Amino acid sequence: MDKRSKIIIGIFFAVLLAIIAIEISRPRPIDWKPSYSAMDKIPFGGYVLFKELSQLFPNEAITLVEESIYPILRKRDSSTMSNYIVINDVVVFDKQEAKQLLHYVHQGNDAFIAATSFDSYLSDTLKIKVKTSYSVLEDTVLLSHTNPAFPTKKHLYSKGLNHTYFTAVDSLKTSILGYIEPKKKASSLLDDVSNGLKTKSPNFIRVPYGQGNFYLCTAPQAFTNYYMLRGNEDYVSFSLSYLKNNPIYWDNYKKAGRKIIDSPLRFILSQSALKWGYYTSIIGILLFVIFRAKREQRIIPVIEPLENSSIEFAKTIGSLYFEHKDYSDLIAKKINYFLAYLRTHYYINTDDLSDKTAKELSAKSGKPLKETKEVLEFLKQLKLKTKHSEEDLIALHKKTSTFKK
Protein backbone atom coordinates (compact mmCIF):
# COMPACT_ATOMS: atom_id res chain seq x y z
CA MET A 1 0.00 0.00 0.00
CA ASP A 2 1.48 3.32 -1.08
CA LYS A 3 1.73 6.48 1.03
CA ARG A 4 -1.19 8.21 -0.71
CA SER A 5 -3.58 5.31 0.03
CA LYS A 6 -2.55 5.31 3.68
CA ILE A 7 -3.29 9.04 3.98
CA ILE A 8 -6.77 8.60 2.42
CA ILE A 9 -7.61 5.71 4.76
CA GLY A 10 -6.32 7.71 7.74
CA ILE A 11 -8.51 10.70 6.83
CA PHE A 12 -11.53 8.40 6.38
CA PHE A 13 -11.17 6.89 9.85
CA ALA A 14 -10.50 10.28 11.44
CA VAL A 15 -13.76 11.64 9.98
CA LEU A 16 -15.62 8.49 11.07
CA LEU A 17 -14.34 8.79 14.64
CA ALA A 18 -15.24 12.49 14.71
CA ILE A 19 -18.83 11.71 13.62
CA ILE A 20 -19.13 9.03 16.30
CA ALA A 21 -17.78 11.38 18.98
CA ILE A 22 -20.25 14.10 17.97
CA GLU A 23 -23.17 11.66 18.02
CA ILE A 24 -22.21 10.40 21.49
CA SER A 25 -21.75 13.87 23.00
CA ARG A 26 -24.81 15.47 21.38
CA PRO A 27 -27.78 15.73 23.81
CA ARG A 28 -30.77 13.62 22.90
CA PRO A 29 -33.86 15.49 21.69
CA ILE A 30 -36.88 15.16 23.96
CA ASP A 31 -39.33 12.55 22.73
CA TRP A 32 -42.83 14.02 23.09
CA LYS A 33 -44.75 11.17 21.52
CA PRO A 34 -47.34 9.57 23.83
CA SER A 35 -46.30 6.20 25.24
CA TYR A 36 -48.01 5.55 28.62
CA SER A 37 -45.74 2.51 29.05
CA ALA A 38 -44.56 1.64 32.56
CA MET A 39 -40.99 1.37 31.27
CA ASP A 40 -40.78 4.73 29.45
CA LYS A 41 -39.27 7.78 31.18
CA ILE A 42 -40.16 10.14 28.33
CA PRO A 43 -42.59 13.00 29.17
CA PHE A 44 -45.70 11.09 28.16
CA GLY A 45 -44.58 7.72 29.55
CA GLY A 46 -46.03 5.99 32.61
CA TYR A 47 -42.86 5.20 34.56
CA VAL A 48 -43.47 7.59 37.50
CA LEU A 49 -47.07 6.52 38.13
CA PHE A 50 -46.23 2.83 37.91
CA LYS A 51 -43.46 3.28 40.50
CA GLU A 52 -45.81 5.24 42.77
CA LEU A 53 -48.59 2.63 42.72
CA SER A 54 -47.02 0.88 45.72
CA GLN A 55 -47.46 4.13 47.69
CA LEU A 56 -51.04 4.64 46.54
CA PHE A 57 -51.96 0.99 47.25
CA PRO A 58 -49.72 -0.07 50.14
CA ASN A 59 -49.15 -3.76 50.84
CA GLU A 60 -50.97 -4.77 47.65
CA ALA A 61 -49.56 -6.87 44.81
CA ILE A 62 -49.00 -4.96 41.55
CA THR A 63 -48.97 -7.07 38.39
CA LEU A 64 -47.55 -5.75 35.11
CA VAL A 65 -49.68 -7.17 32.27
CA GLU A 66 -47.70 -7.67 29.04
CA GLU A 67 -50.35 -9.65 27.12
CA SER A 68 -54.01 -9.52 26.16
CA ILE A 69 -56.48 -8.84 28.97
CA TYR A 70 -58.48 -11.99 28.16
CA PRO A 71 -56.14 -14.75 29.46
CA ILE A 72 -55.06 -12.64 32.45
CA LEU A 73 -58.60 -12.19 33.75
CA ARG A 74 -59.49 -15.79 32.92
CA LYS A 75 -56.61 -17.24 34.95
CA ARG A 76 -56.81 -14.89 37.95
CA ASP A 77 -57.98 -15.96 41.41
CA SER A 78 -61.67 -14.97 41.33
CA SER A 79 -61.93 -15.22 45.11
CA THR A 80 -59.70 -12.11 45.48
CA MET A 81 -61.04 -8.71 44.46
CA SER A 82 -58.70 -6.50 42.40
CA ASN A 83 -58.40 -3.38 40.21
CA TYR A 84 -57.53 -3.22 36.50
CA ILE A 85 -55.91 0.02 35.26
CA VAL A 86 -55.68 0.90 31.54
CA ILE A 87 -54.21 4.23 30.41
CA ASN A 88 -53.72 5.06 26.73
CA ASP A 89 -54.87 7.53 24.06
CA VAL A 90 -57.19 4.98 22.48
CA VAL A 91 -58.41 1.87 24.30
CA VAL A 92 -59.82 -0.78 21.97
CA PHE A 93 -60.79 -4.31 23.03
CA ASP A 94 -61.96 -7.10 20.80
CA LYS A 95 -65.34 -8.58 21.67
CA GLN A 96 -63.90 -11.40 23.80
CA GLU A 97 -61.69 -9.01 25.76
CA ALA A 98 -64.56 -6.56 26.33
CA LYS A 99 -66.89 -9.33 27.52
CA GLN A 100 -64.20 -10.66 29.85
CA LEU A 101 -63.62 -7.18 31.31
CA LEU A 102 -67.37 -6.68 31.81
CA HIS A 103 -67.59 -10.06 33.55
CA TYR A 104 -64.59 -9.12 35.70
CA VAL A 105 -66.25 -5.88 36.89
CA HIS A 106 -69.64 -7.56 37.28
CA GLN A 107 -68.09 -9.90 39.87
CA GLY A 108 -67.22 -6.95 42.14
CA ASN A 109 -63.86 -5.77 40.80
CA ASP A 110 -63.10 -2.24 39.57
CA ALA A 111 -61.69 -1.07 36.24
CA PHE A 112 -60.02 2.34 35.79
CA ILE A 113 -59.71 3.41 32.14
CA ALA A 114 -58.20 6.74 31.07
CA ALA A 115 -58.45 7.38 27.33
CA THR A 116 -59.62 9.93 24.78
CA SER A 117 -61.48 7.20 22.85
CA PHE A 118 -63.15 4.13 24.30
CA ASP A 119 -63.94 0.75 22.80
CA SER A 120 -67.26 0.76 20.89
CA TYR A 121 -68.61 -2.45 22.45
CA LEU A 122 -67.78 -1.17 25.94
CA SER A 123 -69.22 2.27 25.14
CA ASP A 124 -72.49 0.77 23.92
CA THR A 125 -72.78 -1.46 26.98
CA LEU A 126 -72.13 1.40 29.42
CA LYS A 127 -74.16 3.89 27.31
CA ILE A 128 -71.44 6.53 27.01
CA LYS A 129 -70.24 8.82 24.22
CA VAL A 130 -67.19 11.08 24.09
CA LYS A 131 -66.28 14.07 21.98
CA THR A 132 -63.08 16.03 21.39
CA SER A 133 -63.38 19.75 20.65
CA TYR A 134 -60.41 21.33 18.88
CA SER A 135 -59.83 25.03 19.26
CA VAL A 136 -57.11 27.61 19.84
CA LEU A 137 -57.41 26.71 23.53
CA GLU A 138 -56.99 22.96 23.09
CA ASP A 139 -53.61 22.92 24.84
CA THR A 140 -54.75 24.77 27.95
CA VAL A 141 -57.41 23.04 30.05
CA LEU A 142 -58.41 22.79 33.71
CA LEU A 143 -59.35 19.52 35.41
CA SER A 144 -61.24 19.32 38.69
CA HIS A 145 -63.06 16.83 40.94
CA THR A 146 -66.60 17.00 42.32
CA ASN A 147 -65.87 15.22 45.61
CA PRO A 148 -66.23 17.81 48.42
CA ALA A 149 -63.60 15.92 50.43
CA PHE A 150 -60.97 16.96 47.89
CA PRO A 151 -59.50 20.48 47.68
CA THR A 152 -61.33 22.75 45.26
CA LYS A 153 -58.10 23.29 43.32
CA LYS A 154 -58.29 23.22 39.52
CA HIS A 155 -55.36 21.47 37.89
CA LEU A 156 -53.83 23.26 34.91
CA TYR A 157 -52.66 21.30 31.87
CA SER A 158 -51.09 23.32 29.10
CA LYS A 159 -49.42 20.79 26.83
CA GLY A 160 -50.61 17.69 25.04
CA LEU A 161 -54.21 17.59 26.32
CA ASN A 162 -57.26 17.96 24.10
CA HIS A 163 -60.66 19.09 25.28
CA THR A 164 -62.24 15.61 25.44
CA TYR A 165 -65.38 15.05 27.46
CA PHE A 166 -68.50 12.88 27.80
CA THR A 167 -71.48 13.98 25.74
CA ALA A 168 -73.81 11.14 26.77
CA VAL A 169 -74.02 8.94 29.89
CA ASP A 170 -76.63 6.80 31.59
CA SER A 171 -77.94 9.47 33.95
CA LEU A 172 -79.75 6.94 36.17
CA LYS A 173 -76.55 5.08 37.07
CA THR A 174 -73.59 7.30 36.24
CA SER A 175 -71.92 9.56 38.80
CA ILE A 176 -69.89 12.54 37.59
CA LEU A 177 -66.58 12.65 39.48
CA GLY A 178 -64.73 15.36 37.58
CA TYR A 179 -64.91 18.09 34.95
CA ILE A 180 -62.76 19.55 32.19
CA GLU A 181 -62.91 23.17 31.05
CA PRO A 182 -60.77 25.48 28.90
CA LYS A 183 -58.66 28.06 30.67
CA LYS A 184 -60.13 31.48 30.12
CA LYS A 185 -57.96 34.01 28.35
CA ALA A 186 -57.95 37.75 28.89
CA SER A 187 -58.40 38.46 25.17
CA SER A 188 -62.00 38.99 24.17
CA LEU A 189 -61.20 37.66 20.70
CA LEU A 190 -60.16 34.31 22.12
CA ASP A 191 -63.27 34.30 24.32
CA ASP A 192 -65.42 34.77 21.24
CA VAL A 193 -63.64 32.01 19.30
CA SER A 194 -63.87 29.53 22.18
CA ASN A 195 -67.38 30.48 23.23
CA GLY A 196 -68.55 26.90 22.84
CA LEU A 197 -65.90 25.67 25.28
CA LYS A 198 -66.42 28.04 28.16
CA THR A 199 -68.67 25.76 30.20
CA LYS A 200 -67.13 22.84 32.00
CA SER A 201 -67.95 19.34 30.79
CA PRO A 202 -67.79 15.97 32.56
CA ASN A 203 -64.57 14.09 31.88
CA PHE A 204 -64.38 11.69 34.85
CA ILE A 205 -67.30 9.38 35.67
CA ARG A 206 -68.19 6.27 37.64
CA VAL A 207 -70.46 3.67 36.01
CA PRO A 208 -71.67 0.85 38.30
CA TYR A 209 -71.80 -2.53 36.58
CA GLY A 210 -72.95 -5.55 38.54
CA GLN A 211 -71.15 -5.51 41.87
CA GLY A 212 -68.20 -3.46 40.59
CA ASN A 213 -67.55 -0.09 38.96
CA PHE A 214 -66.01 1.37 35.83
CA TYR A 215 -64.03 4.59 36.41
CA LEU A 216 -63.61 6.39 33.08
CA CYS A 217 -61.45 9.48 32.50
CA THR A 218 -60.89 11.32 29.19
CA ALA A 219 -57.47 12.80 30.13
CA PRO A 220 -54.87 10.00 29.98
CA GLN A 221 -52.08 12.58 29.59
CA ALA A 222 -52.72 13.71 33.18
CA PHE A 223 -51.31 10.39 34.41
CA THR A 224 -47.96 10.67 32.57
CA ASN A 225 -44.47 11.52 33.83
CA TYR A 226 -44.62 15.11 32.57
CA TYR A 227 -47.55 16.15 34.74
CA MET A 228 -46.79 13.84 37.67
CA LEU A 229 -43.50 15.74 38.10
CA ARG A 230 -44.95 19.23 37.51
CA GLY A 231 -47.17 19.57 40.58
CA ASN A 232 -50.29 17.77 39.31
CA GLU A 233 -49.74 14.50 41.14
CA ASP A 234 -52.71 15.31 43.41
CA TYR A 235 -55.11 14.93 40.49
CA VAL A 236 -53.82 11.40 39.91
CA SER A 237 -53.96 10.39 43.58
CA PHE A 238 -57.50 11.82 43.98
CA SER A 239 -58.67 10.03 40.84
CA LEU A 240 -57.21 6.66 41.85
CA SER A 241 -58.43 7.03 45.43
CA TYR A 242 -61.86 5.81 44.31
CA LEU A 243 -60.35 2.36 43.75
CA LYS A 244 -60.44 0.00 46.71
CA ASN A 245 -57.16 -1.00 48.34
CA ASN A 246 -56.92 -4.27 46.42
CA PRO A 247 -54.26 -5.87 44.18
CA ILE A 248 -53.57 -3.93 40.99
CA TYR A 249 -53.31 -5.10 37.38
CA TRP A 250 -51.45 -2.47 35.33
CA ASP A 251 -52.11 -3.00 31.62
CA ASN A 252 -48.83 -2.45 29.75
CA TYR A 253 -50.05 -4.23 26.60
CA LYS A 254 -52.58 -1.82 25.12
CA LYS A 255 -50.13 1.05 24.97
CA ALA A 256 -49.14 3.44 22.18
CA GLY A 257 -45.52 3.02 23.28
CA ARG A 258 -45.52 -0.78 23.42
CA LYS A 259 -42.27 -2.12 21.95
CA ILE A 260 -42.91 -3.97 18.69
CA ILE A 261 -39.81 -5.61 17.19
CA ASP A 262 -40.13 -6.30 13.46
CA SER A 263 -36.53 -7.34 12.77
CA PRO A 264 -33.36 -8.15 14.71
CA LEU A 265 -31.58 -5.09 13.25
CA ARG A 266 -34.33 -2.75 14.43
CA PHE A 267 -34.02 -4.07 17.96
CA ILE A 268 -30.21 -3.80 17.89
CA LEU A 269 -30.34 -0.17 16.75
CA SER A 270 -32.93 0.68 19.44
CA GLN A 271 -30.53 -0.37 22.23
CA SER A 272 -27.55 1.92 22.78
CA ALA A 273 -25.10 -0.81 23.83
CA LEU A 274 -26.07 -3.16 21.00
CA LYS A 275 -26.04 -0.32 18.46
CA TRP A 276 -22.43 0.65 19.24
CA GLY A 277 -21.45 -3.01 19.36
CA TYR A 278 -22.91 -3.38 15.87
CA TYR A 279 -20.99 -0.32 14.62
CA THR A 280 -17.78 -1.60 16.20
CA SER A 281 -18.23 -4.95 14.44
CA ILE A 282 -18.67 -3.23 11.08
CA ILE A 283 -15.50 -1.17 11.63
CA GLY A 284 -13.61 -4.31 12.68
CA ILE A 285 -14.69 -6.12 9.52
CA LEU A 286 -13.52 -3.19 7.38
CA LEU A 287 -10.12 -3.20 9.14
CA PHE A 288 -9.86 -6.96 8.62
CA VAL A 289 -10.55 -6.64 4.90
CA ILE A 290 -8.01 -3.83 4.51
CA PHE A 291 -5.17 -5.61 6.35
CA ARG A 292 -5.99 -9.00 4.87
CA ALA A 293 -5.36 -7.59 1.42
CA LYS A 294 -1.71 -7.15 2.42
CA ARG A 295 -1.25 -10.76 3.51
CA GLU A 296 -2.60 -13.76 1.64
CA GLN A 297 -2.07 -17.30 2.88
CA ARG A 298 -1.07 -19.81 0.21
CA ILE A 299 -3.56 -22.53 -0.62
CA ILE A 300 -3.14 -25.68 1.47
CA PRO A 301 -2.80 -28.71 -0.84
CA VAL A 302 -5.39 -31.47 -0.58
CA ILE A 303 -3.85 -34.75 0.64
CA GLU A 304 -5.74 -37.82 -0.48
CA PRO A 305 -6.33 -40.38 2.31
CA LEU A 306 -4.53 -43.74 2.12
CA GLU A 307 -6.49 -46.58 0.60
CA ASN A 308 -7.66 -49.39 2.87
CA SER A 309 -5.65 -52.33 1.45
CA SER A 310 -7.43 -54.86 3.65
CA ILE A 311 -10.74 -54.10 1.88
CA GLU A 312 -9.06 -54.53 -1.51
CA PHE A 313 -7.55 -57.83 -0.32
CA ALA A 314 -10.95 -59.10 0.81
CA LYS A 315 -12.49 -58.16 -2.54
CA THR A 316 -9.70 -60.03 -4.38
CA ILE A 317 -10.12 -63.19 -2.28
CA GLY A 318 -13.87 -63.04 -2.71
CA SER A 319 -13.47 -62.79 -6.48
CA LEU A 320 -11.23 -65.88 -6.52
CA TYR A 321 -13.76 -67.96 -4.58
CA PHE A 322 -16.57 -66.74 -6.83
CA GLU A 323 -14.65 -67.70 -9.98
CA HIS A 324 -13.67 -71.18 -8.73
CA LYS A 325 -17.07 -71.82 -7.08
CA ASP A 326 -15.44 -73.74 -4.22
CA TYR A 327 -18.56 -73.69 -2.00
CA SER A 328 -17.37 -76.44 0.33
CA ASP A 329 -14.26 -74.51 1.34
CA LEU A 330 -16.28 -71.33 1.87
CA ILE A 331 -18.89 -73.18 3.96
CA ALA A 332 -16.17 -74.77 6.10
CA LYS A 333 -14.60 -71.37 6.74
CA LYS A 334 -17.96 -69.77 7.56
CA ILE A 335 -18.81 -72.61 9.97
CA ASN A 336 -15.44 -72.27 11.73
CA TYR A 337 -15.90 -68.48 11.90
CA PHE A 338 -19.41 -68.86 13.37
CA LEU A 339 -18.27 -71.42 15.97
CA ALA A 340 -15.40 -69.10 16.94
CA TYR A 341 -17.97 -66.33 17.34
CA LEU A 342 -20.03 -68.53 19.71
CA ARG A 343 -16.95 -69.41 21.78
CA THR A 344 -15.73 -65.81 22.17
CA HIS A 345 -19.15 -64.28 22.85
CA TYR A 346 -20.95 -66.96 24.88
CA TYR A 347 -18.02 -69.02 26.25
CA ILE A 348 -19.39 -72.42 25.27
CA ASN A 349 -17.69 -75.56 24.04
CA THR A 350 -18.42 -76.08 20.33
CA ASP A 351 -16.67 -79.43 19.92
CA ASP A 352 -19.94 -81.29 20.53
CA LEU A 353 -23.06 -79.64 19.07
CA SER A 354 -25.47 -81.67 21.21
CA ASP A 355 -28.80 -80.79 22.82
CA LYS A 356 -26.94 -79.78 25.96
CA THR A 357 -24.88 -77.31 23.95
CA ALA A 358 -28.07 -75.99 22.32
CA LYS A 359 -29.73 -75.40 25.72
CA GLU A 360 -26.65 -73.64 27.07
CA LEU A 361 -26.35 -71.44 23.96
CA SER A 362 -30.07 -70.61 24.05
CA ALA A 363 -29.86 -69.53 27.68
CA LYS A 364 -26.81 -67.33 27.14
CA SER A 365 -27.85 -65.77 23.82
CA GLY A 366 -31.52 -65.24 24.68
CA LYS A 367 -32.57 -66.98 21.45
CA PRO A 368 -35.47 -69.49 21.46
CA LEU A 369 -34.36 -73.08 22.02
CA LYS A 370 -36.06 -74.25 18.84
CA GLU A 371 -34.21 -71.68 16.70
CA THR A 372 -30.90 -72.54 18.39
CA LYS A 373 -31.35 -76.27 17.75
CA GLU A 374 -32.22 -75.64 14.09
CA VAL A 375 -29.00 -73.64 13.58
CA LEU A 376 -26.78 -76.26 15.23
CA GLU A 377 -28.51 -79.13 13.39
CA PHE A 378 -27.98 -77.29 10.10
CA LEU A 379 -24.27 -76.91 10.90
CA LYS A 380 -23.98 -80.64 11.64
CA GLN A 381 -25.73 -81.49 8.38
CA LEU A 382 -23.37 -79.31 6.37
CA LYS A 383 -20.34 -80.88 8.08
CA LEU A 384 -21.52 -84.36 7.11
CA LYS A 385 -22.02 -83.47 3.45
CA THR A 386 -19.08 -84.01 1.12
CA LYS A 387 -20.28 -81.71 -1.65
CA HIS A 388 -22.05 -78.38 -1.21
CA SER A 389 -24.06 -76.14 -3.46
CA GLU A 390 -24.55 -72.39 -3.77
CA GLU A 391 -27.95 -72.79 -2.04
CA ASP A 392 -26.24 -74.34 0.98
CA LEU A 393 -23.89 -71.37 1.23
CA ILE A 394 -26.76 -68.87 0.99
CA ALA A 395 -28.82 -70.73 3.60
CA LEU A 396 -25.84 -70.88 5.98
CA HIS A 397 -25.22 -67.15 5.59
CA LYS A 398 -28.86 -66.30 6.32
CA LYS A 399 -29.13 -68.54 9.41
CA THR A 400 -25.86 -67.37 11.00
CA SER A 401 -26.56 -63.70 10.24
CA THR A 402 -30.07 -63.95 11.73
CA PHE A 403 -28.72 -65.67 14.86
CA LYS A 404 -26.16 -62.91 15.43
CA LYS A 405 -28.77 -60.13 15.40
Image (cartoon, grey):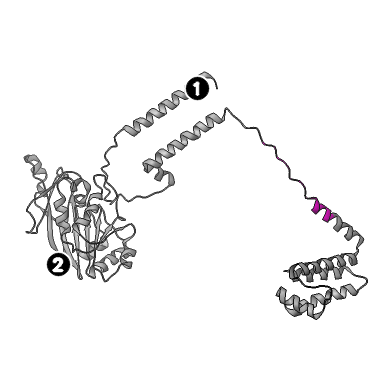
Q: Quadrant of residue 326?
A: bottom right
Can you tell which of label 2 and label 1 is closer to the viewer? Answer: 1
Task: Indicate which disc residue 391 carries.
Answer: none
Relative horizontal placement of residue 23, taking residue 212 as reference (left or right): right
In the rendered image, residue 377, in percent from the top left (x then y), is placed at 83, 77
Task: Pick the quarter of the image with the C terminus.
Answer: bottom right
Tell me the residue that label 2 is attached to: 173
Instruction: Name the residue located 80 percent from the left edge and 67 percent from the top edge.
Output: 340
Residue nearest the viewer, comparing 341 with 49: 341
Three-letter code for the amino acid on which mark 1 is drawn? Lys
Tell me the residue that label 1 is attached to: 6
Residue nearest the viewer, comparing 76 with 381: 381
In the rendered image, residue 169, in percent from the top left (x then y), is placed at 16, 62
Relative horizontal placement of residue 85, taking residue 359 as reference (left or right): left
Based on the picture, tell me whether residue 305 belongs to the magenta stretch: yes
In the rendered image, residue 243, in percent from the top left (x then y), is placed at 18, 62
Q: Which residues are magenta?
A: 300-315
Instruction: Name the residue located 75 percent from the left edge and 75 percent from the top edge.
Output: 361
Say which element carries label 1. helix
Q: Quadrant of residue 177?
A: bottom left
| Residue 367 appears in the rendering | no
Residue nearest the viewer, comparing 138 with 395: 395
In the rendered image, residue 212, in percent from the top left (x then y), is placed at 20, 68
- Residue projecting furthest to the top: 3
